[in-house]
Image (cartoon, coloured by chain):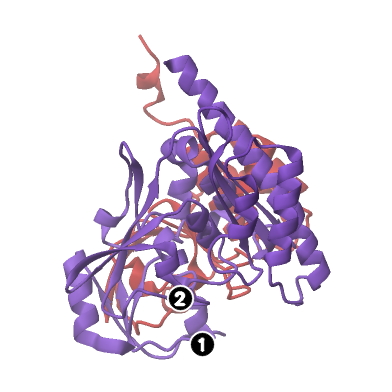
Chain colours: A purple, B red
Amino acid sequence: MQIPAQFDYVRASTIEDALAQLELHGPESRVVAGGHSLLPMMKLRLARPEWLIDINDLYELDFILPEATQLRIGALTRHSTLLESADVARLFPIVIDAERVIADPIVRNRGTIGGSLCQADPAEDLATVCDVLRAQAVVRGPAGERILSMDEFHKGPYETAVAQNELLVEIRFPIRPRSGSAYEKVERRVGDWAVVAAGAAVSLAEDGSVDDVAIGLTAVGLDGTIAEAEAVLRGRQPSQALFEEAGRLAALASLPVADQRGPVDYKRHLADELTRRVLRRACARALETQTTTTQEG
Amino acid sequence: MQISMTVNGDEITRAVEPRVLLVHFIRDELRLTGTHWGCDTSNCGTCVVLMDGVPVKSCTVLAAMADGHAITTVEGLATGATLDPVQQGFMEEHGLQCGFCTPGMMLTARALLDRNPHPDDTEIREAISGQICRCTGYATIVRSVKWAADHPVVAEDAEEEVPA
């Protein structure tokens, strides 16, 4: 039987209350939201916080808010809510691609986007999604709010820039015209962590060439997006030959390690193939939006 | 700490240690042993209960987190001696063999049918994809849920819903 070590529990009623509790209880206090990362770690005694500050009552952090230039998502938004959001599906199909393969529907009923990002598991799908969408993380603390890029947010495996007395409150995805995005993951069985996964976001210029592109890989030891693979595409008309070259360079840049999910060669092969596929699909989706926009105009 | 919640319609209040998991609270404290305790790692889904109507894995929820919420366990499915259509469906279509996964399967099925009264096979399989059955191979479980979808409880106020 797996039971966490002893701790004290308090439920925060507002963001300010959560921050005050973190300040009051100090370094051995941890925030819990969905609990599907922290509680398993506590059951294995890999984490032993003395205080748990439950933020599940902070309904003000459970929102999906489309604005003219960005989509704002509250940190307490459940995976299941993201998956069912028409705004998310329309603007950022990569999020739907990824959410469909994160754990299982029942875990997705509890787990939150903020919790996933703060856990910062090196195989976390949403980390790659946020990287390629050039997302911003809004972090609140006693001194006010900080807005971080994903590069600033991610410090390494299981480590983020969120200080002990701070709370991740919001994720922002910038909205670009003529853009498309996609995610694809290979897993050993349904709901498992990725063997390898790839994500891409593409914005096209009016002439159909690639204005901006971001490519990310999950579970192969990379931080941030893969600049050398992106450079191949930028400013050029998308083509299968370029997707293949980008895939090759992404696989070269990857740093997979052999484990129970597969050997290095296999993971490199996946990095290559999945990069091509997500680029192809992201570009196709960008063209679809372009067509839709034209028709509406 | 003291927690209160509604379990199968009954208000309960108990003193618990914060570290007590909801599955153990339900089984050991409330003695509702229909909720099974399986893998302990939120994989197998036999511990699924409904929290405010939403399926959750109770091995990965603290009892304290359920304070103030409404919990439904498998014991809360039937109305008196009348089985929920999901329960009846599992009988009619042989949805269980050993029965270990059954409580979680039935609660997930109930929540699915409440949201989507006529799911197709793919939707049923997706809904139960976080749960493991090692006996039936799922085919009979899917048939059981379909049986339940085909035999809904007729609401008492159903006549009012018919447009005049």
> In the depicted view, which residue is nearer to us: B163 or A17?
A17
* Residue position for label 1: A46
- x, y percent for residue A225: 56, 60
- x, y percent for residue A189: 73, 60
Q: Quadrant of the C terminus of chain A?
A: top left
- x, y percent for residue B17: 35, 85
- Label 1 lies in what chain? A
Task: Name, please, the residue furthest toward the front.
Answer: A235
> Do marks 2 and 1 share a chain?
yes
Disc 1 secondary structure class? loop
Answer with mark 2 or mark 1, whichever residue precedes in sequence: 1
Quarter residue A170 falls in: bottom left
How crowded is the residue under tag 2: few (<14 C-alpha within 10 Å), some, or many (20+)?
some
* Residue position for label 2: A155
- Label 2 lies in what chain? A
- Whether residue B151 appears in this view of the structure is no
Q: Amino acid at mark 2?
A: Lys
Q: Residue at x 43, y 90 (%)?
A: A5
- Whether residue B143 appears in this view of the structure is yes
Q: Amino acid at mark 1?
A: Leu
- x, y percent for residue B117: 53, 34
Residue A149 drawn above or below residue A7: above
